[in-house]
Image (tube, grey):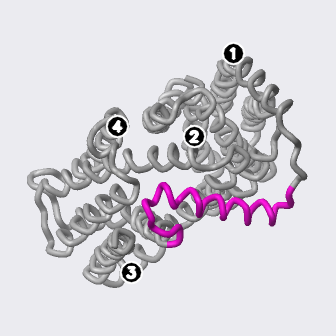
Amino acid sequence: MSNFLNNLGSAIYNLVFVIYVAEVYHSKTMLFIANNIMMLPIYFQIFVGFQSDKTKNKSRALLISGYVQALLFIGVAWLTQNATFVTFSLICLINVISDMLALYSSNLRLPLFKRFLGEEELREAFSFNHFVRILSNIGGQFLGVWLLTISHNNYGLVAFLNALTFFLSTVLLIGIFKDYDSLVEKEAQNSQEEPEKSKKQSLKGAWKVLQGAFETVGSGISVKRLLLALTLQFTLAGAENVMFNMYFLSHPIGILSYEQILIALNLVSTAGLVAGDLTPNDWFSRQTYPFLLICNGLLVALFGFLCLLNYQGYFLLVLLFMTGYIFAKSSPKLTSELLIAIPEDYFGQVMGLISTITQLAIPVGGFLLSGLLVWNETATWILYTLIAAVSVLLLSVKKKLAQD
């Protein structure tokens, strides 16, 4: 429930902020800044991970960060009364700080999962957590628009309710931390304090830890190959919205109109994610992480190949559902297995390192493939299919070599 409220708060104002800038300032430049300012926290994930790993009293820090987020959005509620460039700049800054605090809080929560759940329960917990994130993101967007509608675009009221979600999310954690703090205190008494490491030393250590963890998670596949395959698939994910929108504009599915196709794409993809998250013990959930990536790569390659052949059947929607389903298996599996394999003082840095690499691939893929799409649609789908096939080959070849 705490995670749901925290994610709900972030989702509400990310959308409302863009609407606020568009409706109040009527400036394309400011709207461009508002849309891109939310990308900034991606570049600080490793730094935030370092700070969260370095934090000794994690429960206290998590509570403080939640209260600070609530106070920040009370400030936003007051700032929205004035429409000046200074106000716009301050709200942008608050959004960035709040998103970084959300990353920080997310890293601080990871030890809670490991401390209170067994290894078998972790995957189920992260699957459900992934479902909660999807639910809160969708619910947050609808709730944000609904609140604006009934309040006649009262952005201050929405910001205040946003602050309330962060406050309630934090309050719900207080009872959990009593057991956690006592457990950590006992361990601290029985362990010797290690000398503090520099950021450079800590980052090198995080990379070594990641390599060691991927020996288990990757079933013998090297960390470089696994990360490269993962990055290639996220690169394709970054271009999918634009490519799908362009493709179905001239290739309708059955009797569906263009608007109905776009709605169907979102519904089917979301349904696949939800179905995957709510079935954490099926056959796919018991397979290795590289196998799930191979399945995802094959589905994406088949989708691209069919689009290359100008296919217009409903089977494309089936492929999209299965892609969402497999992704909902692979993401929680990676998180839970890494959480088991890496030491607690490297949780934030390792997860930040992986997130930075993969999430930076999304805008890169969107920019490159979207640009190529304007020039030549056929060449774009050929490249899309080849990239997916290469990601599968990276994992398959290594798997065979490992078995030999």
Residue 16's label in the rendered image is 2
Query: Going 32% across and 64% down the picture, which residue do you hit?
Result: 297
First in sequence, mark 4 or 3: give its number: 4
Mark 2 neighbour class, 10 Å CA radius: few under 14, some 14 to 19, many 20 or more: many
Q: Position of residue 379 (x, y in %)?
A: 29, 83
> Which residue appears at 45% of the width and 49% of the height?
331
Look at discs 2 and 3 and give the one toward the viewer. Answer: 3
Q: The disc labelled 4 sits on which kind of residue? A: Val
Q: Residue 336 location, x and y as percent? A: 51, 43
Residue identified by numbered label 1: 175
Q: Which residue is mark 4?
A: 274
CA–CA distance in space, label 2 to label 3: 32 Å
Asked whether 136 falls inside the magenta stretch, the response is: no
Kindly report the distance in space between the C-alpha atoms of the residues bearing marks 4 and 2. 25 Å
Q: CA distance from mark 1 to mark 2?
A: 32 Å
Q: Is residue 206 on the magenta stretch?
A: yes
Image quarter (top left, top right, bottom left or bottom right) of the N terminus: top right
Per the rendered image, the range of residues in magenta is 197-224
- Going 72% across and 22% down the picture, which residue do you hit? 177
Please tell me whether mark 4 or mark 3 is closer to you in this view. 4
Q: Earlier in the sequence, mark 4 or mark 2?
A: 2
Q: Which residue is mark 3?
A: 372
Q: Amino acid at mark 2?
A: Val
Between the residue at mark 4 and the residue at mark 1, the CA separation in whole angstroms equals: 29 Å
